[in-house]
Amino acid sequence: TRIEKGNYRHFMQKEIFEQPIVVAQTLQSYVRPFEGKVALPDFDFDLSTVNRVTIVACGTSFYAGMVAKYWFEQFARVPVDIDVASEFRYRQPVLEPGGLALFISQSGETADTLAALRHAREEGQTIAVVVNVPTSSMAREADLLLPTHAGPEIGVASTKAFTCQLSVLAALAANLARAKGRLTEDEEREIVEHLREAPEAMNQALNHDEDIAGMAHLVAPARDVLYLGRGPDYPMALEGALKLKEISYIHAEGYAAGEMKHGPIALIDDLVPVIVLAPSGPLFEKTVSNMQEVRARGGKIILISDAKGLAEAGEGCVATIEMPEVHPLIAPLVYAVPVQLLAYHVAVAKGTDVDQPRNLAKSVTVE
Ligand code: G6P
């Protein structure tokens, strides 16, 4: 079957807007809402035996893995190692018997990730794979196959596959937490409820499409852009910068907000837009003080936060984008939307080839 753009101008735009549906579709396989339980597809493996998770992926899938590291450690208290596949394979990683190695890939064919998977198998790891193409090499070689149900992704820059990966990983974190005795029945029921709120929260984020299109002129002329975040929003900052680089060709860097003063602060002047991802919560105040450091140097801030955060720190920003207030486990799913839309609209403003950016391939099958 041929995949059409329908009323959308680009596949990427269509795929951004499909997210609430495909995330709901994906979550269906990972939660039992009536029982208030998270669940995994059938497999024969006792998660309670997992003492270490090693995550390996490339590109956007790697950033999904970085978010998952925060979740697995915070909710399940299981230590996590993470590497990009091209480094993992050749640095002689120490893999102890009984470990779980988790590979994340949209295509299931990325050469570096596949080579890393085979290496981990040789080293006696149990192989879990989060993959969007069910007939792919990685899917075939998995012990635990954790499919995303994003449907075919055509835009070279990954969007809906990413949020579907995050959905599976959030559910996996909750499953792992339960297996490790870290979740009461009530807490599990609550998490299921929060996961089920994700598609609607993403819809609310999508409602800001026009506002975000109106902000493209703040970013399009820039030579450099900085993305800042803390906790799971740090990998989201990296993903925001990657999206912008991929399709608008603007040099962008994602940084852990607290690390900014160790270097990138030297770049800041009134020509460098600084995009801050900061849901209200325990880390918020710290990020606000980083924003003050930016402002003191004339930096122009675009703040993405919830109503509470914007009330406290929105003043003095050149633009703000209001996200619904959500549980930390689904915040990255929701904050992915404005990050993608901003990159999209900046690319459209610059007139680049959004679906087929120069020099990039959808699936990289050479090492
Ligand atoms: C390429 C694509 C990216 C993707 C990465 C990993 O670089 O352009 O969008 O994130 O490969 O691909 P995978 O299929 O393994 O997720």
Image: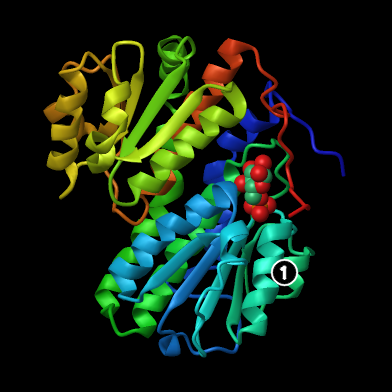
Residue at left offset 69%, top offset 23%: 7
* Residue 131 rendering spot, x and y as whole percentages: 65, 61
Q: Amino acid at mark 1?
A: Ala
Residue at left offset 59%, top offset 53%: 58
The reply, left or right, for residue 34 in relation to residue 187 is right
Q: Which residue is mark 1?
A: 139
Q: Secondary structure at mark 1?
A: helix
* Residue 117 rendering spot, x and y as whole percentages: 66, 71
Could you say which is closer to the camera, residue 258 or residue 197? 258
Residue at left offset 27%, top offset 34%: 305
Q: Is residue 24 visible?
A: no
* Residue 93 rendering spot, x and y as whole percentages: 52, 73
The reply, left or right, for residue 79 in relation to residue 186 is right
Question: Residue 103 occupies which quadrant of the picture?
Answer: bottom right
Q: Residues within 10 Å of mark 1 (few under 14, many from 20)?
A: many
As drawn, the residue found furthest toward the front would be 91
The reply, left or right, for residue 127 in relation to residue 231 is right
Could you say which is closer to the camera, residue 260 or residue 248? 260
Could you say which is closer to the camera, residue 330 or residue 188? 330
Q: Is residue 71 visible?
A: yes
The reply, left or right, for residue 364 in relation to residue 295 is right
Could you say which is closer to the camera, residue 145 or residue 263? 263
* Residue 258 rendering spot, x and y as whole percentages: 22, 42
* 236 versus 133 height, above or below: above
Quadrant for the N terminus, please: top right
